[in-house]
Amino acid sequence: MKIKYPWPDMKVGDSVFIQAEDGELFYKLKRNVWTSSHHHGKRTGKKFSIRVDQANNGVRVWRIE
């Protein structure tokens, strides 16, 4: 099984930048990343914070708990 996002490997304080693919909208990317991190967090007790980074064409995710 291929893991798309690094949620299992992230420690509190870690962040990861996820680049939008060509033509992908920032808010669609943010919604997809949020959904993935939220479901992972519910299963494992971890929490994440996500912010759109339009200047760099993607989103940044921090593990906060």
Image (spheres, rainbow, N blue to C red):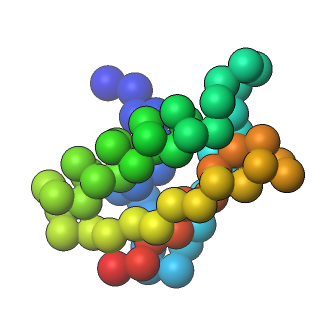
Rendered residue at 64%/30% (across/down): 25
Horizontal placement of 61 versus 41: left or right? Answer: right
- The quarter of the rendered structure image containing the N terminus is top left
Q: Residue furthest left?
A: 43
Nearest the viewer among 40 and 9 is 40
Horizontal placement of 26 versus 6: left or right? Answer: right
Horizontal placement of 17 versus 39: left or right? Answer: right
Nearest the viewer among 47 and 6 is 47
Q: Residue furthest right?
A: 55
Query: Where is residue 9 shown, x and y percent of the image?
Result: 42, 59
Query: Where is residue 33 shown, x and y percent of the image?
Result: 45, 43
- The quarter of the rendered structure image containing the C terminus is bottom left
Rendered residue at 34%/43% (across/down): 36
Rendered residue at 33%/43% (across/down): 35
Residue 52: which quarter of the image? bottom right
Query: Where is residue 2 shown, x and y percent of the image?
Result: 40, 26
Horizontal placement of 7 versus 59: left or right? Answer: left
Rendered residue at 70%/44% (across/down): 58
Up/down of 31 relative to 40, above or below: above
Q: How many marks?
A: 0
